[in-house]
Amino acid sequence: MRDDAESAQGHVRPAPESFLDPALVADISANGVNQQRRGLLKKALAGAVAAMGSAAAVANSDSNIVDIPEWSKILGKPVAANPYGLPSKYEANIIRRQSPGLTQTDQASVAFTPLQSMFGMITPSGLHFERHHQGWVDIDPRRHRFMINGLVDTPMVFTMEDLMRMPSVSRMHFLECGANTALEWGNSAVPTVQYTHGMLSGSEWTGVPLSLLLERAGYNKKARYILAEGADGSSMTRTINMENALDDVLVAYGQNGEMLRPEQGYPLRLVVPGVQGVSWVKWLRRIEVGDKPYATKDETSHYVDLMPDGMQRQYTAIQEAKSVITSPSGGQKLMNKGYYCITGLAWSGRGTVTKVEVSTDGGRNWREARLEGPALPKMLTRFNADWVWQGDEALLQSRVHDSTGYIQPQRAELVAVRGTRSIYHNNAIQTWRVNQSGEVDNVQLG
Ligand SMILES: Nc1nc2c(c(=O)[nH]1)N[C@H]1C(S)=C(S)[C@@H](COP(=O)(O)O)O[C@H]1N2
Ligand SMILES: [Mo]
């Protein structure tokens, strides 16, 4: 795991030095950022650009600045050289990764999103994490059918064309696997945020509200639950209560402005905002309306929470509020003392993120982070906080508050209730330790 993790690690990038006033940088390095200087810095850097003290002077002697590079002297590539655009070749390290040894086969496995390298709140579709129980399939949309049956007046079968002619909505929501951060129940061997928290992505989803389809089929008054079923070999089946089903659940075909990617369930998947990933059934082919939970294999033996008294909690669907610092994070290295922007993501399956606090001393002192962009319900929210690293050991943590008043627990608080034998629903505060050489690793306190 170490080798792969090493290739996954990103160094925290230094600021574009030429933007920095060397006197200011020297002052920051020597004294930390005082309020006045902080204002100046913000103005100079339009917010939060990392200042790397000793590197600042190098800029003027950097030959790249004075020489005219080859790309300034050639005719560039024509339009549509890439008919479907791709990232720069210099970004080839920013990819989904499998955790070696985590699963025995690549078809019942996970590829994690590289959270450490991402900005904002949207996950590019090509970097959305993948979790399949029996491999992914690329279904011909003309041959795909979606059925609603069970306790309804009129069982219905829809083609993709039928569905895409219906009124649609687009909403941004996070998708988190219930097993995200699972290994942290036991130990802190997982080296990077990609592996600790990377079963998490955020997208804009487009589709037909399930409530509309259920109404059209005429659901029975006795209906209490639905069963959602996938068309892949795993026949993924999950019970969802009627309250959720009629609330904000979507039968979705769109992801970030285009059709779903095959790995995300093309051409149709369920979007169940705030609920663990397993209920977001991909390659969705059927919804059955019923009056009791279905107790399928995917909800009685899997996706249950083993409690300290040996009992299993079932149907714990909601992803509670959680946050994580994505940079600086495990496997990265602070190259120098000075200014850093602590950045990360916060989310809540019960509503919106109202506040994020960060600590650099393992939770003794907290201060409020800036929330960037809109804080949307059941969606990732980006947070940022200014920090000047003085070269001492630091313990970085973030803690989210959500619109229900819930506050993300420290690991010890969570373990006191849940024990350490769970796999699912670990939303504890994550700690990254920065040592005196600037290396960042994953530690658990208490
Ligand atoms: N049909 C089907 N749906 C599925 C799965 C699956 O294997 N088959 N995996 C589930 C699990 S456990 C998760 S976490 C999410 C992952 O969605 P993603 O691969 O788009 O990230 O899909 C869910 N839906
Ligand atoms: Mo999952």
Image (cartoon, grey):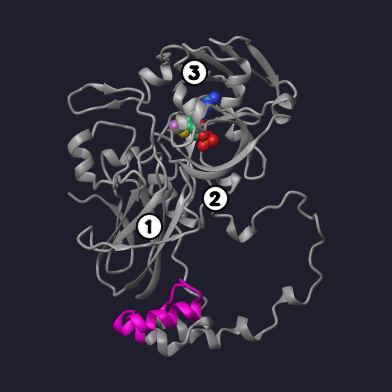
Q: Which residue is identified by label 2? A: 122
Residue 147 sits in which quadrant? Answer: top right
Circle 3 crowding by C-alpha within 10 Å: few under 14, some 14–19, many from 20: many
Q: CA distance from mark 2 to mark 1?
A: 19 Å
Q: Position of residue 387 (x, y in %)?
A: 35, 70
- Span of residues in magenta: 27-52
Q: CA distance from mark 3 to mark 1?
A: 40 Å
Front residue of 221 and 382: 221
Name of the residue lying farthest toward the bottom: 23
Identify the disc placed on residue 329.
1
Q: Judge from the rendering whether residue 80 lies leftward or rightward of residue 41; answer left or right.
A: right
Q: Earlier in the sequence, mark 3 or mark 1?
A: 3
Which of the image's four quarters has the N terminus? Answer: top left
Q: Nearer the viewer, mark 3 or mark 1?
A: 3
Query: Magenta span has 39?
Result: yes
Quick check: marks 3 and 2 in contact, CB under 8 Å?
A: no
In the depicted structure, whether residue 157 falls above or below residue 399: above
Q: Which residue is identified by label 3? A: 226
Type of amino acid at the residue the image marks with label 2: Ile
Front residue of 405 and 188: 405
Type of amino acid at the residue the image marks with label 1: Ser
Query: Element at badge 1?
Result: loop
Query: Element at badge 2?
Result: loop
Q: Nearer the viewer, mark 2 or mark 1?
A: 2
Q: Position of residue 115 (x, y in %)?
A: 46, 51
Viewer can see residue 388: yes
Q: Nearer the viewer, mark 3 or mark 2?
A: 3
Quadrant of ligand 2: it is top left
